Image (cartoon, rainbow, N blue to C red):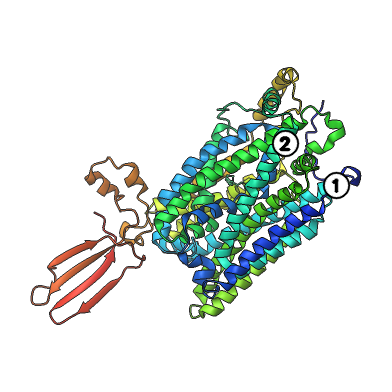
Amino acid sequence: LTVPSRIATAFTMDPSIQKHFTVVDYVIFAVLLAASMGIGLYYALSGGRQRTTQEFLMADRSMRCLPVSLSLIASFQSAVAIIGVPAEIYTHGTQYWFIGCAYVLGLLIPAHVFIPVLYRLRLSSAYQYLELRFSKAVRICGTLTFIFQMVIYMGVCVYTPAFALNAVTGFELWGAVLATGLVCTVYTTMGGLKAVIWTDVFQTIVMFAGQLAVIVVGVHQTGGVSEVWRKVWEGNRISALDLNPDPTERHTFWTLAVGGVFLMLSLYGVNQAQVQRYLSARTEKEAVRSCYMVFPSLQLALALSCVMGLVMFARYCGEDPSDNIFLYIYPQMVIYFVMDMLQGLPGLPGLFVACLFSAALSTISSAFNSLATVTMEDLIKPHFPAMSEARATLLSKVLAMSYGLVCLAMAYLTHLMGDSVLQVALKIFGMVGGPILGLFCLGMFFPWANSVGAVTGLGTGLSVSFWIGIGSIISHSSGTKPLPPDCSSSFLSGNTTTVTQLSALSNVTLSFYSLSYMWYSAFNCFTVIVIGLIISFLTGPMKEQDVTPGTIYPLLGTLFGFLPARLKKKLCCVTPLGQTVFVIKVFHLEQHLHQPDKIFIAPFTISHKIITYVCKTNDILITLTCTLACW
Ligand SMILES: O=C(O)CCCC[C@@H]1SC[C@@H]2NC(=O)N[C@@H]21
Ligand code: NA
């Protein structure tokens, strides 16, 4: 039994065995698009009718934690996960499920480090932080890097569902891409962030429902839970804890649970799409709460897609693959399995198609809106400060629309990638998201970093990450071979030794390019920090008092909380977390002006500027300076 080593890319199934939709299925798909449009229209005509950028881009900073948390999940849970994760589990077992361990720190650190700093600065774009901490140039570099990352990622997200469906069901490919892209562009342009968040809520529910339906029907048709478990267990698909420290091993506990933390931080900590949702929450506590609420739903999403892969394996493992070549084709195999399961149940194929496109729409709409926000806030507004609110809002809408069209073009580019869509998406996050994460960490945790170091660090990080990323694609060192698809354990005992021997051999030719893509985020993040610090020290490190208040997180102070104050002061890392305070000095005119009569410290969290009001009344002079008290 030979497993084709190179996963053949797509080809369309001959019409005779294609699975077809009934009218009900198309109706359900149309209802999904119509409902999304309806929500967009509602928010275009209600509230402030999207007349200000505060409403269009920031939802009036009035959102509660539940919709924000569901929208946070929807942003990076697209058709790529719905199709790619089951295929991953089918071919490589449940090792990928360990990425769930990364969700703990991957959400706690954003909740207690990134949100407090970014929320208290009352930003609209995450990259404004980079100007406050470093300089305008660093902000522009961060924004452009983010735009590059999201445009490519959007292309993958639009293309994946349409392409997979077309191959299995003859569903009109470019018709689906256009329908998705246009509907998404329209409701995002009309309804702004409020519409994007509430359509995300609706689409996340559809996404879970669709996956659950497939699992229930699939288990039933495979002979029940115990039968599925037996086949999966004997088929060697329940992966043990793989503590192999080899960094070139594609998926091990370390690459997923540790490397995955950095992947999560680059998405849920500093990615504009997520930061914008935190900033749209009505209070900082609501934002932190929404981050906590992401955890259970993200675990549920991961569990559903992994279980779907196991059921798919149990269903097909006994079949002789020669007459079912479809079981080796990314990413169609999942659609094939779904259409095979749901074939006799009118409406359910439509529900799954709705689930697939809900996953895609919710990610793409978040991408549109965040791209329009950063383009507006970081690239346009600074050059046209006098622009009227109405014109700025109109321009934001035009931007959302134009990003929609760019995304359709990117969808075609994805056509040429052909590899596992899950790996493509995770590589993009690692290659581009990792360096941006490094830039923010450099700024928040190291007061000495300066803007020359930041720009150099980012540039180095990006070039190293593209060197590895593109190198790995060219040298085809994409890691482990798929497991044999047979369910009987007897067959496997002999074969696994050859598989491990094979992988041991490949390690001997360890090359730079064979680093697991799950380490890209961590590796690139550290590259940016190390280079950034070295250049900063070479070009004259920044002094604590020169750093804009509220842009430093006292990482060292928090980590070394136990140190005596004297030592902490020397380390100058006791700056309180983003607390900028009013120091009110009251002078009585007749007394010496240099000896203030009273000093009050009022720990307000206010905007980041150094403000000194001098208000002179008949007999007292009050100077109100907001500064960073390093107590
Ligand atoms: O689904 C996608 O569009 C991209 C693949 C998943 C992205 C990462 S993986 C860890 C985290 N959990 C998710 O559900 N999405 C992100
Ligand atoms: Na999504």
Residue at disc 1, CB closer than 8 Å to ligand 1: no
Q: Quadrant of residue 153?
A: bottom right
Of residues 212 and 579, the one drawn nearer to the viewer in this rendering: 212
| x 59%, y 36%: residue | 97
Front label number (2 vs 1): 2
Q: CA distance from mark 2 to mark 1?
A: 24 Å
The mark found on residue 216 in the picture is none
Residue 537 located left or right of residue 525: left
Residue 293 in the image: state x and y as whole percent: 48, 48
Badge 2: few (under 14), some or many (20 or more) residues near its Cα, within 10 Å?
A: many
Q: Residue at x 75, y 33 (%)?
A: 221
Residue 401 against residue 237 in the figure, above or below: below
Lateral position of residue 108 relative to residue 158, left or right:
left
Residue at 60% over, 38% down: 303
Query: Which mark is first along the chain, 1 or 2?
Result: 1
Q: The C terminus lies in which quarter of the figure?
A: bottom left
Mark 2 — residue? 218
- Circle 1 packing at 10 Å, graded few (<14), some (14-19), many (20+), is some
Q: Residue furthest right?
A: 16
- As drawn, which residue projects farthest toward the left? 590
Residue 343: percent from left, percent from top:
80, 43
Per the image, label 1 sits on a secondary structure element best described as loop
Residue 409, percent across and down?
A: 73, 62
| Residue 478 appears in the picture as rendered | no
| Depth order, front residue of 315/127 | 315
Nearer-the-camera pick, 587 or 191: 191
Q: Residue at x 82, y 50 (%)?
A: 21
Residue type indicated by callout 1: Thr
The circle on residue 12 is 1
What amino acid type is highlighted by mark number 2? Gly
